[in-house]
Image (spheres, rainbow, N blue to C red):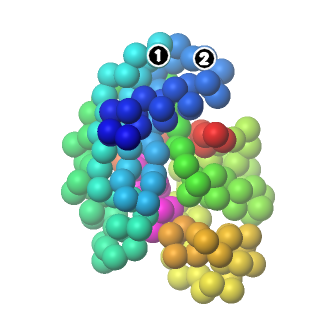
Amino acid sequence: LSADEEARLVYDGVRSEVVDPAARLAVFDLGGGSLECVVGERGRIELTHSLPLGVLRMQREADIRMRVHELAGDVLDAIRASEPDEVILAAGTARALLKLAKRLDRRDAVLGCIGRGTLRAMTELLRGCTPSELGQLGITVSRHDTIAPGALVLSTIVERLGVPIVRVAQG
């Protein structure tokens, strides 16, 4: 798939889950090799960017937060300026983080959402976890190597956008 085709599929899938399909949505789909960023309103895509910030790439980065700001800063600032009605995180890392937030009984992990503070706290928690500790937290073995870098990428995005809470796509 081309980046534009992938953006369309992600946006359409997420749009089908929201209460107001006419809302301006900012969608972030974190994969292994890239981060897809899409903004659209009323079914019309206005902005797409594919950035080399996937979780497999970020495993090798010494300073993930700095790399996200370096590669995505201008894009995130443009998305923030577009004033989305809702910010949505898609893909497995986001769903694993929502599941962890619920397991930790975080107040803001309700109705498919995660608060910025919870995302930040989970990022710090996951940073130094051993595989055994990750297992005790309910993180599947297949995510042990990627959950911490993925959490840091997503947390950095949410902080840069300045939104208090994000929705996690279920599809």
Q: Is residue 155 magenta?
A: yes
Q: Is residue 169 magenta?
A: no
Q: Residue at x 71, y 78 (%)?
A: 135
Mark with earlier residue (2, 1): 2
Query: In the picture shown, does residue 113 fall above or below 140?
Result: above
Q: Is residue 146 visible?
A: yes
* Apparent side of residue 144 relative to residue 45 in the rendered image (left or right): right
Residue under label 2: 20
Tell which of 37 and 156 is nearer to you: 37
Q: Which mark is residue 141?
A: none
Q: Which residues are magenta?
A: 149-158
Main SS, magenta region, reads: helix
Mark 1: few/some/many CA within 10 Å (<14, 14-19, 20+): some
Query: In the picture shown, does residue 169 fall above or below 136?
Result: above
Q: Residue at x 48, y 62 (%)?
A: 150
Mark 2: few/some/many CA within 10 Å (<14, 14-19, 20+): few
> Which quadrant would the C terminus be assigned to in this image?
top right
Q: What's the amino acid at mark 1? A: Gly
Residue under label 1: 43
* Apparent side of residue 129 relative to residue 109 in the rendered image (left or right): left
